[in-house]
Amino acid sequence: MAWITMSFDSEALHMPVMLDVLIPQGHGNYKTLYLLHGAGGDHSSWITKTRIADYVDNKDIAVVMPSGNNKCYINNVNGKDYYTFVAEELIRKCELWFSLSRKKEDRFIAGMSMGAYGAVNAALENPDQYAAVFSYSGLMDMIERFDNPRGIDFEPVFGDREKLLTGNYDLMEKVHNYKEQFSVNVDNATRFYLYCGLSDRILHMSDQMYMNMRDQGYYVKYQTAEGNHDWKYWDSCVEETIKIILNQKSENQSIVNQKDKMKVSI
């Protein structure tokens, strides 16, 4: 396995961008996981804070980890086009530079907290792009977070509260609006996997997103376990994600249903 740290000039962002890539050294045409960090992180977060390199060592999967600069992986109202970068330019360039499969069934995206918001948003906007999306402790209700920013100023990203409400940024609303494209009856529909720790302060957001997606007919699975909003929990999530992508773990082994989860949460 090769570990590549690189900087390149992004056309979408009009600035240099740092990127970490883990890639096998073999036949090519690899499955690829695009892995997004959360607020306060950067391209190195997954490498330095989890065992992601161990989980993909000697496996036929590449992992691409870009920097998101606390901009929620969307095209900012008063800034740069991070959605275009992550969901379009990054994929195009990585598939050009590296031996990555260009098939939907081999392309995956995941993230924690703010990165989960970016991952789910990218998947909803691109029904033909990802086989599956994985949300770890996802910041699924951006309006709630906007009202309680916890040290991050979201106005340069979304504009004021009114622009956030009317600007197609609300994932809950998108789930409703895009449901026909993601129904379980659609051939090769993108699969959604939600994970959250039982002690996580934003557990309710994953609860709500799961019920919303389930009720709208999405292919969605939800798991909770003991854990908090921290790297220890996210490390276990990404380990399981790699196993699911490589078909080493049955979905039925890794998922509890909403009824059982609510019993555990009380």
Image (cartoon, helix red, strand yellow):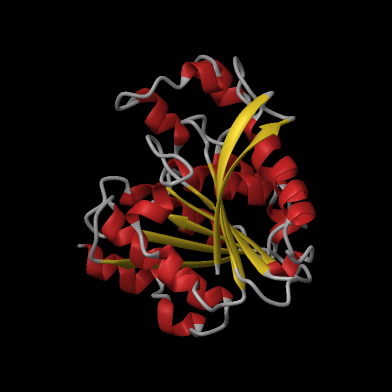
- Residue, x 33% and y 54% (percent of image)? 49
Q: Is 216 placed above or below 241 here?
A: above
Image location (x, y in percent) of residue 110: 53, 56
Image location (x, y in percent) of residue 117: 51, 43
Quarter residue 257 falls in? bottom left
Q: Is residue 151 visible?
A: yes
Left or right: residue 222 versus residue 65 is: left
Seen from the viewer's position, the closer of residues 63 and 173 is 63
Image location (x, y in percent) of residue 38: 42, 42
Seen from the viewer's position, the closer of residues 16 and 130 is 16
Q: Is residue 168 visible?
A: no
- Residue, x 61% and y 57% (percent of image)? 216
Image quadrant in which the N terminus is located? bottom right
Seen from the viewer's position, the closer of residues 3 and 93 is 3
Quarter residue 104 falls in? bottom right
Left or right: residue 144 versus residue 179 is: left
- Residue, x 32% and y 69% (percent of image)? 261
**What is the count of numbered marks?**
0
Image quadrant in which the C terminus is located? bottom left
- Residue, x 70% and y 59% (percent of image)? 182
Q: Is 187 placed above or below 174 here?
A: below
Seen from the viewer's position, the closer of residues 77 and 235 is 235
Left or right: residue 213 versus residue 189 is: left
Quarter residue 218 falls in? bottom right
